[in-house]
Image: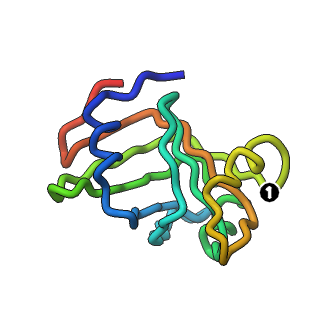
Amino acid sequence: MIQLPQEILEAWEVRDPVAVFTTVDTEGVPNTIYVSMCALRADGRVLIGDVHFSKTLKNLQQGCAQVSFLFFAKDHSAYQLKGQVRYASEGPLFEEGQCLAKPEFSLRGVVEIQITQAYKGSEQLGL
């Protein structure tokens, strides 16, 4: 478990509701999507709800282990969180992620990113 910098936690509270999530395929080709059903945990994890993943899910199923997650604070500062990923469509992680579901959607799965690096713009933040 890591301790996230207070700056990230504060920026998360005033973030734009849409974030950017990037995976890579087996050839190293990136795939980037917008996500809105996500949560930042103080223990250094990001949870993302999967409602419509297609290429992203394929990348995760084929072994994509490192991902990038980017969100913007209201002052337009960009925060990029990189880390190791896992995906669950059942079990404890899936149950934890149910809080992400909006009434009009049901989750097919939940992505968990264990943050290993954090940036504000190009500046690396200590974890």
Spot occupied by residue 44 in the image (x, y as percentages of width and height): 49, 32
- In terms of image quadrants, where is residue 9? top left
Tell me the amino acid under the disc marked 1. Answer: Ser
| Quarter of the figure with the C terminus | top left
Spot occupied by residue 67 in the image (x, y as percentages of width and height): 50, 51
Name the residue at 48% across, 36% down: 115
Colour mode of the rendering: rainbow
Give the vertical position of 57 relative to 98 (above or below).
below
Name the residue at 43% across, 44% down: 82
Give the vertical position of 95 relative to 25 (above or below).
above
The front one of 68 and 1 is: 1
- In terms of image quadrants, where is residue 51? bottom right
Name the residue at 54% across, 62% down: 37
The front one of 98 and 116 is: 98
The image shows a total of numbered marks equal to 1
Give the vertical position of 82 relative to 76 (above or below).
above
**Residue furthest right as drawn:** 91
Q: Is residue 81 left or right of residue 60?
A: left
Spot occupied by residue 5 in the image (x, y as percentages of width and height): 31, 28
The front one of 2 and 7 is: 7
Spot occupied by residue 94 in the image (x, y as percentages of width and height): 76, 50
Give the vertical position of 3 relative to 96 (above or below).
above
Q: Secondary structure at mark 1?
A: loop
Q: Classify mark 1: residues with Cα within 10 Å, few (<14), some (14-19) or many (20+).
A: some
**Residue hosting label 1:** 89
Name the residue at 70% across, 54% down: 98
**Residue furthest left as drawn:** 75
| Quarter of the figure with the N terminus | top right
**Residue furthest front as drawn:** 103
Q: Is residue 86 left or right of residue 120?
A: right
